[in-house]
Image: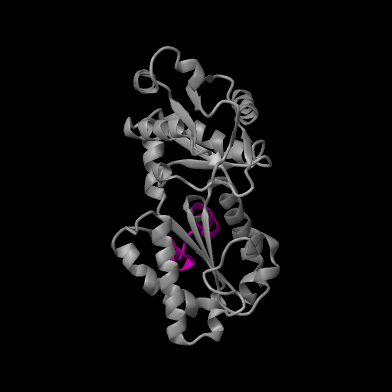
Amino acid sequence: MKILLIYPVGKYKNPYSIDDKEYDFDSTYSLIKSNLLHDNPDISIDTLTELVLSNSYNESLKKSDYDVYLCDTTTYNGNYLYIAGLLDGLNKPVIFCSYIDHPPLPVTMGKLSLYYSESTLNNEFRESLNKVVSNFLINKSNSIQYEFKKQASKAFISYSHVDFEYLNRLMVHLKPLEVHNLIDIWQDTRLKAGDRWSEEISNALDNATIAILLISADFLASDFIVNNELPSILKKAQVNGTKILPVIVSPCRFLREKEMCQFHAINDPNIPLSLLSINEREVYYDKLASEIEKSLNLTKT
């Protein structure tokens, strides 16, 4: 198996970063390459610098025949934005990746993307990258990328059964997105008698790129949610960029939960849905539906 690493050489600063953060790509990709070779001793790895000697990016990439192209889009470097778009246009088997604090680019929306940080390069990111590379190795085609594109519009709703009335009303607002086949929403009412419920929930979490959390005191008191669903959701947010959309249903300790309160809630945590009128709740259900459309890059504004 042959892999091509595409990343800016040296150190780059993100011109749009508030703190003028500098990214050391040589160090990052030296570690990524070392981990890949250690975990997959039969593969060979080249870099874009080694590939592009005399020809242009365009000619070199058109003629190239790698099993996987790992393309970093962390900085807004024009050359690498062009390369990302070129690879997509050539229908190459691409894994897009970027630093976790860097927003996704339009060219990577709905594509196979992984996110890393210093703390995940040797752990969660490494595990996710190896899993994807192994899938490419087995299939040796674009089928994995196509499969991901189909899964890119899947959402998972985590909630306490005590708050079912809120889920029920929210689903009314999300129904048009399902009717138009824009998103596939999973919540445990889809479980049928005889289903292996733990396995079904695990698969749904693995496939979701959007997680809706209906948060209440009952939600935070649920052993299953706190010990099973939430860790998986938070891990996917860190490694795969899963979008987390909290909705505060009733008074609870959301703002005191460090891992969760970092995600911006749809409504003011101090004014949960339970304290609002029915019409006021409708506004936030619609806002959530709108946020989902934006995250799927489906709005035209």
Residue 30: x and y in percent read 63, 25
Task: Give the total of numbered labels.
Answer: 0
Residue at image point 45% right, 86% down = 278
Quarter of the image holding residue 186?
A: bottom left
Q: Which of 110 and 18 is in front in this view?
A: 18
Outermost residue on the top side: it is 54
Where is 136 relative to 212, above or below?
A: above
Quarter of the image holding residue 146?
A: top left
Where is 166 relative to 85, above or below?
A: below
Q: In which quarter of the image is the C terminus?
A: bottom left
Name the colour scheme.
one colour
Where is 41 relative to 289, above or below?
A: above
Residue at image point 56% right, 77% down = 249
Q: Does the magenta stretch include residue 196?
A: yes
Q: Does the magenta stretch include residue 202?
A: yes
Outermost residue on the bottom side: it is 277
Residue 290: x and y in percent read 40, 66
Residue 162 makes an appearance in the image: yes
Residue at image point 39% right, 42% down = 107
Q: Nearer the viewer, residue 194 or 125?
A: 125
- What segment carries the magenta color? 185-203
Residue 209: x and y in percent read 47, 53
Q: Nearer the viewer, residue 157 or 83?
A: 83
Residue 142 makes an appearance in the image: no
